[in-house]
Image (spheres, helix red, strand yellow):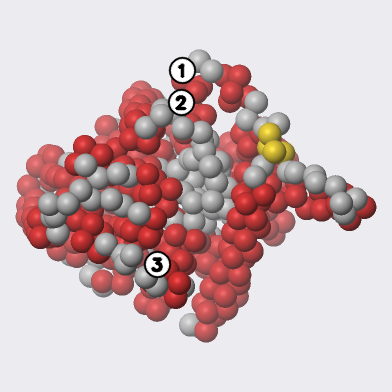
Amino acid sequence: MGINYRIVIHVLGLLLMFNGLFMVLCLPASFYFNLDDIVPMAFSIAITIGTGLAAWVMSRSSEKPNIRKREGFLIVSFGWLVMSLSGTLPYILSGSVVSFADAFFETVSGYTTTGASIITDLTIIPKDILFWRSMTQWIGGMGIIVLAVAILPILGIGGMQLFGAESPGLKTDKLAPKIRDTAKRLWLVYLGLTAAEVIALKFAGMSWFDALNHAMTTMATGGFSTYNTSAAQFSPAIQYIITLFMFLAGTSFTLTYFGLVGNLKKVLENEEFRYYAAITVFTTLAVSIVVASVVDEPFEKAFRDSLFQVVSVITTTGFVSADYTSWTPFITMVFFILMFFGGSAGSTAGGVKIVRHVILVKNSILELKRQLHPSAIIPVRLNGRAVDPSITYNVVAFIMTYIIMFAVGSVIMTMFGIDLLTAMGSVATSLGNIGPGIGLVGPVDNFAWLPSTAKWLLSILMLIGRLELFTVLILFTPYFWRRH
């Protein structure tokens, strides 16, 4: 059977309408701060919802729709693309971003929760556009596709294929028998933590507007701020609050759910969580000691900046409280390596994910044992259970593909006249959806100076990284398009 393009267009239309409805949430900011800003946002809403409605209506069918695996991959990949394209409208129509390449980069950086930016001065950007900028990260954090999974069954459209394509390669525990109920519970956790952080930040001294923006971009592990100086703008108390919620956002939302309902044993017994916490603690202490001994700062500030930046990078959030590239070359290398870690599987964090590293290391160690006992069947174990060999193969393939894409992307960036350090830093941060890199795209730098061709490449890498490589790369294989 061939691909059912009608159902693909039908769901893409639905996603566009969702996107337009999220834009509507930005209108209160237009009314409150500057009524003149409402026109560009209103036009953006009309175009987005109108286009989505037209696509949805024209692709309706009397037959009961069924999303198969190939339609799922197409919907997820093109869903993020059409969301990003429609998301550029508020930037362009308001004049906040003139170049389409820049607007697409900023929007993709939002939806993929990367946090890299081409906006050099946030103080001149209208408040409703800043709110939309944060909203794109919040939408992308949990995945607009997961939201659709919760809604599609109501419309008679099964969503299991979408949920699988959104996070391919690793299996996570279901919170409910039905995938729709699982998606709903994940969204409730996401909403609840966002609301909790808003309240905590407000009581710590932020305005409601800043608290809401930073809570959305923290829980999305996105890192967009409303200030040019990012988190360095705020008090130590606020930085500690953001650090806590960044860590929670980088934890599997399934585990967070179990923790919230009182099943702490399941959280503490989770091997990935233990490695995630241990790496964070160990790296923070090591960086703190180096910073305190080299940089002339009180130990509390050295510890706070170290903790904040370690959690920010390992969770791929990208908030900045200090310029870690100015500390020492050793620390710069530490943070560059952290860019290839990522948070937990099932979180809003990007990157390779801790669990893949755990499986890879365990399999590599066992491979030495297999050399001595070639006939023995020695499975990789995670959380006390044998890991299916297909998952191990997937992990090895994923990491190899990730490294190849990083290497090829870095080489292509140097073809644009960009120095090697900056090329490697920009590709690593884009593919891992992190935000700040190293070189001339470091924590206190910006991506605005890059040529348009480089921005297009990095935008593509952000999308591929957000969808965990295979969801997008499979579309470039000839057998995907063959009739079966």
Q: Nearer the viewer, mark 1 or mark 3?
A: 3
Residue sitting nearer the eye, 385 or 16: 385
Q: In this view, does 51 lie above or below 209?
A: below
Task: Determine which residue is flagged by label 2.
Answer: 257
* Residue appearing at x 37%, y 77% in the figure: 452
* Residue appearing at x 41%, y 61% in the figure: 463
Residue type marked 1:
Val
Left or right: where 40 falls relative to 74: left
Which residue occupies the extreme top position in the image? 262
Task: Determine which residue is flagged by label 1.
Answer: 261
Task: Determine which residue is flagged by label 3.
Answer: 484
Is residue 476 at least partly visible in the picture? no
Q: Where is residue 405 in the image (x, y as percent from the top left)?
A: 56, 69
Q: How crowded is mark 3: few (under 14 residues within 10 Å), some or many (20 or more)?
A: few
Q: In this view, does 123 lie above or below 453?
A: above
Q: Is mark 3 on a helix, strand or loop?
A: loop
* Residue appearing at x 51%, y 33% in the figure: 173
Tell me whether the residue at label 1 lies in contact with that at label 2, contact meaning CB atoms closer than 8 angstroms. Answer: yes
Q: Residues within 10 Å of mark 1 (few under 14, many from 20)?
A: few
Which residue occupies the extreme right position in the image? 372
Q: Position of residue 364 (x, y in %)?
A: 78, 53
